[in-house]
Image (cartoon, rainbow, N blue to C red):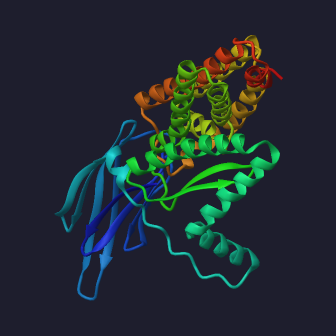
């Protein structure tokens, strides 16, 4: 990931690195120094390099300290022993940065490239949003009813709006919401995230907004007694609960992966695995067989990929972030299961259907 970019003798000096320990230093996009990954952790780093012109050779150095959890980098840059730049950066600076994108070489004509260009054009067209929304409404109306289709689209839009709000909170430019028939919704942004915390917040805000909608529908049912609101509350809860499953690319998969991959020690991944086992046992005891099975599959996927966590460009969560994200995630899951169980207890066969689905 990009750790630092400063102006150095009229050109950008960029430092990139990973939790594995390796670092690469670029001056004007030219590699001038690098540090290989090391088995022992050290906070200090020193990069020494030379810059030459027609008249002289300049001895340059970038040194400092780097802490990953919590993230803090302090640096000093000198040229011929004269201070050029110094300062520090924390996690807030990483969240706001826009890493330099490497220039991609031009490719010859290919069918894949043409399709990719077409998809980019579609993403940028406002008309495609209307077309996809209309297609989704028609598809769901054909399968169910116009009332159910409208309710489903409302759930999807409110869920995706949660993602959009989170993206805007981090200063990311968004392209809006796209409703895709039979696949759900999609919130798009041209910009990439820089930290695991951004991944957690953007991913979990969709289900968080979904919980708001379910609670509002449940209150509307208590006030009016209309079964429509009861059905909307329980169906929306089921939809968002499945989205919280720890399976990529679902939101729950992104959250659990960010938490797990931010743990540096084996104790961390063991704790995560034990928590998953506890979740599976609880799911089976509550009769949520399907939920427990999918929890096993998602947890295994994350455990198998855990060794590659140091190669990620995303800044990891600190201990507070790991605990807060876990509590937030578990609270949302518990809230949705509680809503589903509550409406199932009313004795209505349709309202009991989501709980029966989870028990299959």
Give the residue drawn at x 63%, y 50%.
Answer: 185
**Residue found at x 67% / y 60%:** 132
Residue 112 location, quadrant: bottom right
Tell me how many marks there are: 0
Q: In the image, what residue occupies the spot 44% across and 39% down?
A: 41
Q: Is residue 344 above or below residue 204?
A: above
Establish if 269 lies above or below 101: above
In the rendered image, residue 59, in percent from the top left (x then y), is placed at 26, 69
**Residue 209 on image: x %, y %:** 51, 36
Image x and y of residue 148, in percent: 71, 40
Q: Quadrant of the C terminus?
A: top right
Q: Residue at x 49, y 30 (%)?
A: 325
Q: Is residue 54 left or right of residue 337?
A: left
* In this picture, residue 61 sits left or right of residue 113: left
- Residue toward you, 273 or 165: 165
Q: Residue furthest left?
A: 82
Residue 264 appears in the rendering: no
Q: Is residue 158 left or right of residue 51?
A: right
Observer-nearest of 126 and 291:
126
User: Would residue 117 be found to the left or right of residue 28 on screen?
Assistant: right
């Amino acid at each position: 990931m990009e750790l630092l970019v400063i102006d150095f003798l009229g050109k950008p000096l960029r430092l990139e690195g990973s939790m594995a320990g390796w670092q690469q230093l670029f001056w004007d996009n030219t590699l001038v120094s690098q540090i290989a990954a090391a088995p022992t952790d050290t906070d200090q780093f020193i990069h020494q390099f030379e810059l030459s012109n027609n008249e002289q050779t300049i001895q340059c150095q970038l040194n400092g300290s780097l802490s990953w959890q919590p993230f803090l980098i302090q640096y000093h840059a000198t040229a011929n022993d004269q201070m050029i730049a110094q300062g520090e950066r924390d996690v807030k600076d990483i969240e706001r940065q826009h890493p330099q994108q490497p220039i991609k070489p031009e490719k010859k004509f290919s069918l894949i490239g043409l399709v990719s260009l077409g998809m980019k054009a579609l993403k940028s067209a406002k008309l495609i949003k209307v077309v996809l929304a209309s297609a989704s409404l028609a598809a769901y109306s054909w399968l169910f009813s116009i009332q159910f289709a409208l309710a489903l689209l409302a759930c999807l839009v409110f869920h995706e709006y949660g993602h959009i709000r989170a993206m805007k909170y981090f200063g990311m430019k968004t392209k809006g919401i796209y409703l895709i028939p039979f696949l759900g919704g999609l919130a798009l942004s041209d910009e990439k995230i820089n930290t695991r915390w951004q991944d957690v917040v953007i991913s979990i805000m969709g289900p968080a907004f979904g919980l708001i909608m379910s609670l509002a529908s449940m209150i509307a049912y208590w006030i009016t007694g209309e079964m429509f609101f009861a059905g909307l509350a329980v169906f929306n809860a089921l939809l968002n609960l499945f989205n919280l499953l720890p399976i990529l690319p679902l939101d729950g998969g992104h959250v659990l992966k960010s938490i797990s991959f931010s743990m540096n020690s084996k104790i961390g991944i063991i704790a995560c695995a034990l928590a998953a086992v506890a979740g599976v046992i609880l799911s089976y005891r509550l009769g949520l067989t399907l939920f427990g099975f999918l929890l096993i599959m998602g947890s295994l996927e994350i455990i198998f990929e855990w060794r590659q966590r140091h190669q990620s460009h995303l800044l990891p969560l600190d201990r507070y972030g790991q605990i807060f994200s876990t509590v937030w995630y578990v609270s949302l899951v518990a809230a949705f299961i509680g809503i589903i169980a509550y409406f199932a207890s009313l004795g209505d066969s349709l309202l009991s259907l989501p709980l029966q689905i989870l028990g299959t």
